[in-house]
């Protein structure tokens, strides 16, 4: 299972309404695996609901441009954030949070 959580540290709230796309790297390109939008708590738990997780390299793309525009920022500096990570054991839960502000973002491996 792959899940994410987006927190807006500039506003001090969960980032609700962020569109997230999950892809898996193939031999020559990226294959879509899941897509969703963070809930009122900034969480998204359904990215791999319809996909059997396999070992490999995955990428989460977060649509920060629309999120920041919805929050009143006219010209967001980061239109998106891409986080690439490796799944080496498909039986484990991979939680990849993102912390955002209008001019920066950070990620880490969550628990």
Image (tube, rainbow, N blue to C red):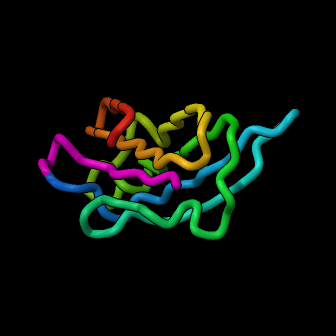
Magenta span has 2? yes
Asked if residue 103 lies left or right of residue 61, the reply is left
The residue sitting at the right extreme is 28
Magenta stretch contains residue 9: yes
Task: Name the spot of residue 80 as percent of width and height, x first.
Answer: 49, 42
Q: Among all residues in the image, which is located at the extreme left?
A: 12
Rendered location of residue 103, percent (x, y):
30, 31
Q: Is residue 84 left or right of residue 54?
A: left
Numbered circles on residues, count = 0
Give 2 or 16, whichever is nearer the viewer: 2
Q: Please say if 59 is above or below 14.
A: above
Q: Is residue 75 left or right of residue 55?
A: left
Quadrant of the image occupied by residue 29: top right
Q: Residue at x 55, y 44 (%)?
A: 60
Q: In the rendered view, would you say 50 is above or below 31?
A: below
Quarter of the image containing the C terminus? top left
Q: Quadrant of residue 21?
A: bottom right
**Residue found at x 35% / y 41%:** 98
Foreground of the two, 103 or 23: 23
Query: At 26% from the left edge and 69% from the top edge, which residue is drawn?
Result: 40
Q: Residue at x 48, y 38 (%)?
A: 81
Range covered by the magenta-colored residues: 1-12
Above/below status of 67 relative to 8: below
**In terms of depth relative to the viewer, which is nearer, 106 or 57?**
57
Residue 27 position in % (x across, y down): 87, 34
């Amino acid at each position: 299972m792959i899940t994410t959580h987006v927190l807006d540290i500039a506003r001090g709230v969960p980032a609700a309404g962020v569109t997230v796309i999950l892809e898996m790297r193939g031999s020559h390109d990226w294959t879509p695996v899941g897509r969703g939008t963070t809930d009122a708590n900034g969480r998204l738990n359904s990215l791999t609901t319809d996909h059997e997780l396999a070992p490999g390299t995955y990428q989460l793309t977060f649509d920060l441009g629309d999120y920041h525009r919805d929050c009143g920022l006219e010209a967001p500096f980061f239109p998106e954030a891409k986080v690439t990570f490796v799944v080496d054991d498909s039986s484990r839960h991979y939680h990849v949070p993102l912390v955002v502000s209008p001019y920066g973002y950070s990620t880490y491996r969550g628990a």
